[in-house]
Image: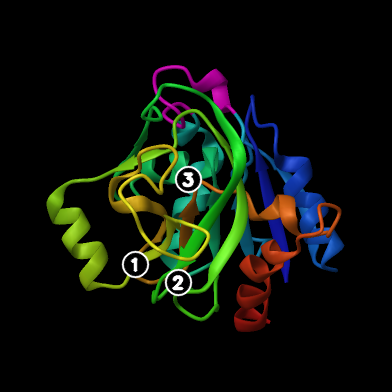
Amino acid sequence: MKFGVVRFPGTNCEQDALHALNHMGLEAEYVWHQESNLDGFDAIVLPGGFSYGDYLRSGAIARFSPVMNEVVRLAKRGNPVIGICNGFQVLTEAHLLPGALIRNKKLKFLCQNTHLQVQDSICQWLDVKPKTVLDIPISHHDGNYTCTPDDYARLLEERRIVLRYCEADGSLLPDSAPNGSFENIAGICNGAGNVFGLMPHPERVVDGVSGNTQGQAFFETIVAQVS
């Protein structure tokens, strides 16, 4: 299984993603944003950063890079696609996922560990028992997820909410989301479960340097399904 890690001008977490995948023994290489053919890749990673300096809106310009036509094509074909942080923002701008990521509630950049409660979802990227609490870092300024009431109802009905910010004991409180995300949403997937967007950075807790390897779970499942 071969992963393509897309690099836009302003991307700055692509090395983290590539290192995490290689550490797990997975084949991965960078893909420049002007690439127009991704046929050699089985799965695509849109990493974090500040694509195009976050001008207009985070992910708004990256959405029109040539590579995104291919990402959309592969996503609709059923190939696995994951968007982490800025990648999540790009996926919403490309309408592969509903909703939008807006400024954090206190208008401050957040770089900290967060607790996430795994939901009972159809996401193909994560096979962890629902209600499990994970400790995954965040690093963003525009991570406040919002969507329309209709979109939220659809996400609930179709089991497409993958992660919610929570307390250490797993409880979901109104202030559990440090960025103010609607209903504590930290990650969602599309209706087929192959496209996954999340604000936290699992690739930063894969190699165990911090004493945490919980990020491995975010890549192991998709490899088992596709291989």
Question: Which of the two labelled residues, at mark 2 and mark 1, occupies the earlier sequence position?
Answer: 2
Residue under label 2: 123
* Magenta-drawn stretch contains 51: yes
Answer whether labels 2 and 1 touch (C-beta < 8 Å).
yes
Amino acid on which disc 1 is placed: Arg
Amino acid on which disc 3 is placed: Phe
Answer whether labels 3 and 1 touch (C-beta < 8 Å).
no
Q: Can residue 96 be seen in this view?
A: no
Report the residue at 51% width, 81% height from top: 129
Q: Marks 2 and 3, Cα distance to the nearest angstrom?
A: 15 Å
Badge 1 local density, few (<14 within 10 Å), some, or many (20+)? many
Residue under label 1: 160
Residue 88, label in figure: 3
Relative to 66, is 143 on the left or the right? Answer: left
Q: Position of residue 152 (x, y in %)?
A: 21, 56
Question: How many circles with numbers are drawn on the protein?
Answer: 3
Q: What element carries label 2?
A: loop
